[in-house]
Amino acid sequence: MTLVPAPVLHAMWGVGLRPAHFSHWRATPDLPPWLEVMADNHMFHQGGPGLVCLDRLAARTGILLHGVGLSIASAEAPEARYLEALRALSCRLDAAVISDHLCFTRAAGRESYDLLPIPHTAKMLGHVCSQVARVQVALGEKGACFALENVSSYVSFSTNEMSEMEFLREVCTRTGCGLLLDVNNVYVSARNHGFDARSELAKVDPQHVRQYHVAGHSEAEDFLHDTHDAPVRGEVWELLRYSLGRTGPRPVILERDDEGAHAEDLVREIREGLRL
Amino acid sequence: MKHAAEAVDAEIARWQAEFLRGVQSPHGTEHELAGTGLWSDLEAATRHRLEVYRTGHYARVSYTLADTLFERASALLSREVMAGILGRFFEAHPASAPNLVAASEGVAKFAKMLDDVSEHPWIPDFLTLCERRWAVLTGPDPSPATLHTAASTESSTEAGAESVPHPACSKLQANHFFLASEFAVFSLWNAADDEIADIPSGSLDACVPQAMLLFKSSALTLENVLVPQDFFPFVQALSNGSTLLDAIDALDSQAVDPEALDAAAFGAFVTSLAARGAFATHTIR
């Protein structure tokens, strides 16, 4: 299948849309240039207030769709029902990017609901590329909008043959898939596994980057935990600025899963972080 | 070539199944995985962090739903108790659906078998109510073209006529749920609402039969109707797919004393259902 490259999205920012903020965004006259919708929270709904809210927001601003349940690296093929629901929601909202994670969430017919890491080997690379091609076909006209995100990881495989960014660069090169570059995840994994975050970012092909994520993390006993419940650390903003310098402007989305966080605070935080 | 690809898939399936077994183990990842191929494939210095995934898994399946789908149950029972029920459910029934809400189907039935829940026999019905409310709310929206409201009926009937739809061609909306419980689920639901909160749950007599009919009057509005006990058979017949006419007949045939039925109250109840958009018109073939 030949993919028509998705257009590059320039110079903008946004936040992850959380149900706690629905009423705020509906009421506010100034929406961020992008809102990122958690696909799994809505794609199996047939109706209801959540979809109505998304329709109204999509009429007013750009929508990016982000999922957690695709399980692109599972041994088994992505579920047809899941892919169809994802395609339908992406068309409904005219999502500019449809992303999920380089990980597996499902094995032997069971779901973990977590982003489980994979070894970065040539065998795994071939497998992931096949899976990405399946997803692109299933997404139809939206296939070119598909992007994979690097994850935070806590364990590493002694069988690794390449780094995560080298792995993703190959996936993107071979399939035409985009990269959702989560700078916080690079920072967290770098600290957890003892590599240099900036050197890892330097391995990214700037042309592959469709979108960025930034988020906060917390410190555990001997590792960093990607908890999305704290402000973005200064080191992560610095890494983002470094990477933006290589790629040029792309949508940067602040992710925050802390129920107590106010939408206005998130807007202030990302605008300050990006020095807008 | 095909055999080589199948071998790769089998190898991936093998270590991923081991990984997930460790993540979902009630005994801990090292207990579950030490000596496996996956264990030796992991950097020794990072193996202990598999526990992050295990604790994350249990937190996700229990607290995510305790805070969303079963939020009202958490308000009545406490978040920890509700999360505990969910944790035990997923330990006994590992999730196989990518959608966590779908994977939790059966929690109410499971709760009936728990010793500590049996002291509060209303809990399973209340959990059913939580599940079904969500299902109705996120189910198909009523179609304005077929939705029978008082306003639409009034416009099509002569002035002074009762604002109820035509009984022979009206049914309950397909997307609805009727719960007839031996317990006071309706009152308990309201008691768990922070915004109502004028009914202290401790003072409630939970052992009062109540029934609720749930449906949507629009994409945004879920209707919760308390069904008077005398009308349970009527609403049950509607819920089973009867037309309004057939359900009225069912009420007559099932009433202990048809003469004792309060016709005015019944008329007001049906009118109220119609006004809230419970009925959809269907074509008689």
Image (tube, rainbow, N blue to C red):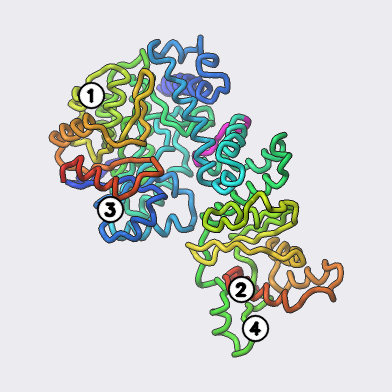
Image disc number at residue A52? none
SS class, disc 1: helix
- Viewer-side label of 4, 3: 4
> Which of the 4 image quarters holds residue A119?
top left
Q: Are marks 1 and 3 on the same chain?
A: yes
What chain is tagged by disc 3? Answer: A
Q: Residue furthest bottom?
A: B159
Q: Looking at the picture, which amino acid does disc 1 mark?
A: Ala
Left or right relative to B279: residue A70: left
Taking the spot 82% from the left edge, 66% from the top edge, the residue there is: B254
Residue marked by disc 3:
A62
In the depicted structure, whether residue B226 falls above or below residue B71? below
* Image mark for residue B274: 2
Q: Residue A30, position in %: x, y?
A: 25, 58
Q: Are marks 3 and 2 on the same chain?
A: no
Which badge, 4 or 2, is on the more N-terminal residue?
4
In this view, the residue in front, B239 or A134, is B239
Chain of the residue on which disc 4 is drawn = B
Q: Residues within 10 Å of mark 4 (few under 14, many from 20)?
A: some
Looking at the rendered structure, which numbered label has been put on residue A197?
A: 1
Q: Secondary structure at mark 4?
A: loop
Q: Tell me the distance, in whole angstroms, between the alpha carbons under discs 4 and 1.
A: 73 Å
Residue at x 59% of width, y 50% of height: B130
Q: Is residue B42 left or right of residue B275?
A: left
User: What is the magenta range?
Assistant: B92-99
Quarter the N terminus of chain B occupies: top left
- Disc 4: which residue: B162
* Chain of the residue where label 2 is placed in the rendered structure: B
Q: Residue furthest right?
A: B257
Can residue B91 be seen at all in this image of the molecule?
A: yes
